[in-house]
């Protein structure tokens, strides 16, 4: 659809003639009680997705209950969620304002349930919520993670506890869009690893202005045996095809006034049995999200649409090391369930 024309005679997406905000995003650093009445009155939580159409390719969309409404501004080449994020930054608008302005009034014929299937280039399906230009990850943000890694590391004992207690957090480059997959897709198992583990996490979508745009469920898939051999092997432990899964949707920041109250659970199924399960809360994380973002931006240029993984508090046992065809389900109730199948990669 095309944007409507405002009283100034220009598109309402023009920065000098913006539409009135239908709601104001709330970010993690705001008082959790601020504007509670306004939020309750609005009640219009926004969930964003991407849909693959065999005829049109990737399309951004808004999910309302089981209905999917595409979002596009064809004149400006805005079709994907990354396009929307970059456009919102360019015209100095909030992402939710741009989405409200551009979302189709008519839903797709296919429902969310029909689209929420394994990727297949011959049929429409839900894709990864965003193809991020960069993904960064934080390590040792949970005490349980520090304790496990120090017990498990063959060299340099105590380095993980040091990082957990230090002022500077662990931040590392995780990959780009080509390393990432969405829900119902595969996660990778390195052929040179015997202990690949899941790392269920809260993912934060940010723009180049340091704003939190929304949240996703994430899996920071890691070859733990490679990292335990020597911490200098961390990039090989962390970066490979299918090493990062994101989804199933992006929940905009205004729906999550307090991300630290989110619960994260994980289940690994092999055949008909459950090999592993665990749960935690984001509130168990030592560091604040804004602190992690501050360090990411320190002496660094961060592109719009960057994803930051905030660390894991769920530690998988070696007995349950991922095997091919294992099914991993990670759930944050307010966001949804990210489901992936493990696949050996070359």
Image: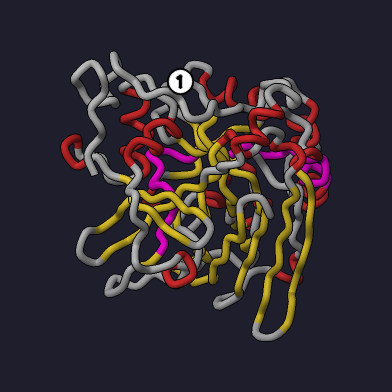
Q: Residue at x 19, y 42 (%)?
A: 74
Q: Residue at x 31, y 52 (%)?
A: 59
Please tell me in which quadrant of the rendered image residue 197 appears.
bottom right
Question: Does the magenta run of residues contain 140?
Answer: yes
Query: Picture coordinates of residue 275 (x, y %)?
Result: 74, 74
Instruction: Sort mark 1 into few (<14), some (14-19) or many (20+) by Cα contacts within 10 Å.
Output: few
Query: Picture coordinates of residue 133 (x, y %)?
Result: 38, 39
What are the residue bounds of the magenta stretch? 126-147
Question: Is residue 244 at least partly visible in the picture?
Answer: no
Nearest the eye: 45 or 119: 45
Question: Is residue 123 at least partly visible in the picture?
Answer: yes
200 lies above or below 286: below
Residue matched to label 1: 209
Residue at disc 1, secondary structure: loop
Q: Residue at x 42, y 35 (%)?
A: 305
Could you tell whether 297 is left or right of 267 in the image?
Answer: left
């Amino acid at each position: 659809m095309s944007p409507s024309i405002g009283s100034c005679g220009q598109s309402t997406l023009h920065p000098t003639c913006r539409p009135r905000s239908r709601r104001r995003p709330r970010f993690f650093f705001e008082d959790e009680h601020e504007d509670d009445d306004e939020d309750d009155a609005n009640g219009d939580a926004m969930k964003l997705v991407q849909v693959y159409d065999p005829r049109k390719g990737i399309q951004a969309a808004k999910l309302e209950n089981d209905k999917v409404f595409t979002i596009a501004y064809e004149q400006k080449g805005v079709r994907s969620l990354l396009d929307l994020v970059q456009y919102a930054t360019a015209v100095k608008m909030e992402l939710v304002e741009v989405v409200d302005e551009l979302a189709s009034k008519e839903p797709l014929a296919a429902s969310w349930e029909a689209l929420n299937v394994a990727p297949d280039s011959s049929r429409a399906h839900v894709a990864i919520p965003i193809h991020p230009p960069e993904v960064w990850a934080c390590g040792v943000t949970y005490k349980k993670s520090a304790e496990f890694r120090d017990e498990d590391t063959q060299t340099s004992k105590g380095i993980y506890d040091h990082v957990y207690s230090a002022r500077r957090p662990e931040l590392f480059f995780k990959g780009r869009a080509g390393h990432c997959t969405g829900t119902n897709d595969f996660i990778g198992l390195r052929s040179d690893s015997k202990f690949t583990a899941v790392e269920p996490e809260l993912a934060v979508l940010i723009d180049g202005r340091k704003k939190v745009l929304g949240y996703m469920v994430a899996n920071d898939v890691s070859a733990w045996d490679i990292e335990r051999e020597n911490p200098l092997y961390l990039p090989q432990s962390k970066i490979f095809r299918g090493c990062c899964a994101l989804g199933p949707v992006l929940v905009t920041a205004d729906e999550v006034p307090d991300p630290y109250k989110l619960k994260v659970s994980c289940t690994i199924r092999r055949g008909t049995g459950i090999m592993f399960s665990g749960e935690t809360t984001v509130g168990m994380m030592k560091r604040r999200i804004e602190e992690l973002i501050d360090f990411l931006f320190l002496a660094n240029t961060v592109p719009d649409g960057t994803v930051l993984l905030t660390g894991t508090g769920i530690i998988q046992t070696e007995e349950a090391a991922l095997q091919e065809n294992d099914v991993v389900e990670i759930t944050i109730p307010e966001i949804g369930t990210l489901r992936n199948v493990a696949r050996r990669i070359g």
